[in-house]
Image (spheres, rainbow, N blue to C red):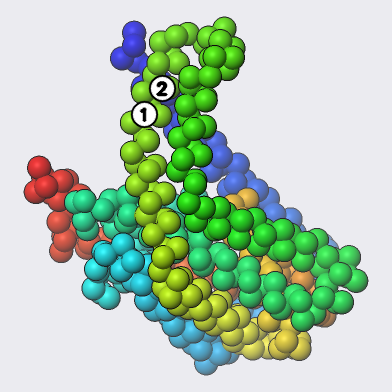
Amino acid sequence: MQNHFPTTNANAAHMKKHFGTLARAAISLGILAYILDNIFKKESPEHPWTEGAAKLWSILLSLDPLWFGGSLALFGLICFVNIIRWQIILRVQHIDLTLWRAAELFFIGHFFNAFMLGGTGGDVVKAYYAAQETHHKKAEAVMTVIIDRLVGLVGMFTVASLMMLLNIRLLFTNDRLRPMAVTVVAVLGFLIFCLFIGFWPGLGTFLHHWRERLFHGTTFMRSMERLVSSSRLQRWRERFASARNSIKKMIGAYQAYASHKPALVQTFLLSLVTHISLIFSVLCLGESLNIIVNRQFYFLMVPAIMCIAAIPITISGLGLREALFVAAFGVGGVSQDKALLLSLLTFATMLIYSVVGGVIYLFFERTHPSAKEIEAQED
């Protein structure tokens, strides 16, 4: 009977994961359907999903290809800068990947982030392949992906906060923009807290003492023994014990960056470059749609929207991002249909580069050893 426990637990975790994914997908589709229905009804109350949709399509067909090409070029620059940033983070752990190899793994991760039903699926895949590049620094390779994502998020929220600070009166006097501003500031504070708590030298000792109190504290253990069987408690002890070394390595890898401040400063500055470039990329898309709004509005709204869309509520921010674009740019006098198209085109630009990652992934294990082959070589 005991042999069935792992399978049962794995199946339960698998079902829970898929339930969460389906819920997020439903939220994404529900928000999109609601926005589209509202826009189409304004265009044609009698035939919203035919004539209204045709109006939206006609706006899309009038897209200026030169401005759209400029947006694509800028997003290509963003990808390149992100690859360089990850290389710097890798070198701190003494993991040397060539620019081409790092680019391959980056685009594969970008592909899975866009097309896997989950916001961090690409990070998991990128971390997996990065770990295969070394036989003795697997935990460190995984940590580089976490650090890269964390630095990127801090950079994004920093840009958003600075832009909001310059327009604080507009944000906090407008009922539609105030919740957005408060959310961005709150999440930035949380990210900075997480970034620095990881650098606390006593973190490993704290976690060790916490584990000891958890499993060896008399009062707690007596309470748990009344709720669960002793065999299950023993399995929990064994799982924590087996994970202890991995957690210790991960903490050590994370804290290594505290003694490499130049690398942290470089990666943070590169993160600022990517997010400012993203603003210009969206601005180009706005010009391609002939959106008439003060260009300063892009610098205020785009970072804030991207920050909130990064919160894993919907699939790749889809639906939530569109709702934010419609609401925020509506304050600037932009029509709902153009604001929606601006958001969808921003997502489409990201998808184009994700397709590049998909092509690389198709041929990846034909030109490089597979994970199983690497493990066999190490054995």
- From this view, report whether residue 62 is shown above or below residue 141: below
State which quadrant residue 321 falls in. bottom right
Q: Amino acid at mark 1?
A: Ala
User: Badge 2 local density, few (<14 within 10 Å), some, or many (20+)?
Assistant: some
- Disc 1 designates what residue? 241
Q: Quadrant of the C terminus?
A: top left
State which quadrant residue 91 falls in. bottom left
Q: Position of residue 39 (x, y in %)?
A: 77, 66
Choose between 163 and 239: the one closer to the eye. Answer: 239
* Residue in the image at 68% along x and 50% along y: 30
Choose between 350 and 187: the one closer to the eye. Answer: 187
Q: Position of residue 128 (x, y in %)?
A: 31, 52
* Residue in the image at 89% along x and 65% along y: 175
Q: Amino acid at mark 2?
A: Arg
- Distance from disc 1 to disc 2, alpha carbons, whole Å, reads 6 Å
Q: Is residue 107 visible?
A: no
Q: Position of residue 87 (x, y in %)?
A: 33, 71
Disc 1 to disc 2: CB gap under 8 Å: yes
Q: Is residue 119 left or right of residue 307?
A: left
State which quadrant residue 287 falls in. bottom right
Q: Position of residue 88 (x, y in %)?
A: 36, 72
Could you tell me which secondary element the residue under label 1 belongs to? helix
Q: Is residue 159 left or right of residue 268?
A: right
Disc on res. 237? 2
Looking at this view, name the residue that lies furthest to the bottom: 66
* Residue in the image at 51% along x and 67% along y: 152
